[in-house]
Amino acid sequence: MSSATWRNVFTYNKYAQITARAVRQSLKETERVAAEKRGVTALRYQKWENGVGGAQVYLNPEEDKGLSKPAV
């Protein structure tokens, strides 16, 4: 079996996500919590009209409220 067999099953991004989750889960509690906080992303956008920026809108508001969920 080749070392690149995972490429036949899923994309590189999915592979990286799985390996990152495995590494985070293997850490001790304090390091794991810090790693999960780094793994959380916030996606937002802002509409600009006539050179003036409008309000910023978060696309994933559930994750912005708290970091209780593990990053996936």
Image (cartoon, grey):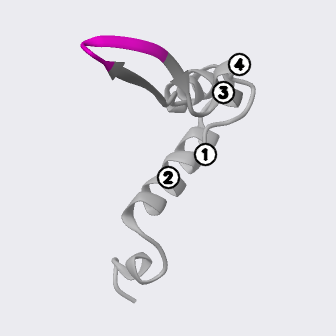
The residue under label 2 is: 17
The residue under label 1 is: 72
Q: Is residue 4 left or right of residue 44?
A: left
Of the pair 26 and 47, the residue shown nearer to us: 47
**Of label 3 and label 1, which has the lower sequence position?**
3
- Distance between mark 1 and mark 2 Cα atoms: 7 Å
- Distance between mark 3 and mark 2 Cα atoms: 21 Å
**Of label 1 and label 2, which has the lower sequence position?**
2
- On whether residue 72 falls in the magenta region, the answer is no
The residue under label 3 is: 61
Magenta part of the chain: 49-55
Q: Quadrant of residue 2?
A: bottom left
Residue 32: x %, y % from top left: 61, 29
- On whether residue 53 falls in the magenta region, the answer is yes
Q: Please give the name of the residue rendered at 45% of the width and 62% of the height, measured from the top-left corner.
A: 15
- Density class for disc 3 (Cα within 10 Å; few <14, some 14-19, many ≥20) is few
Q: Quadrant of the C terminus?
A: top right
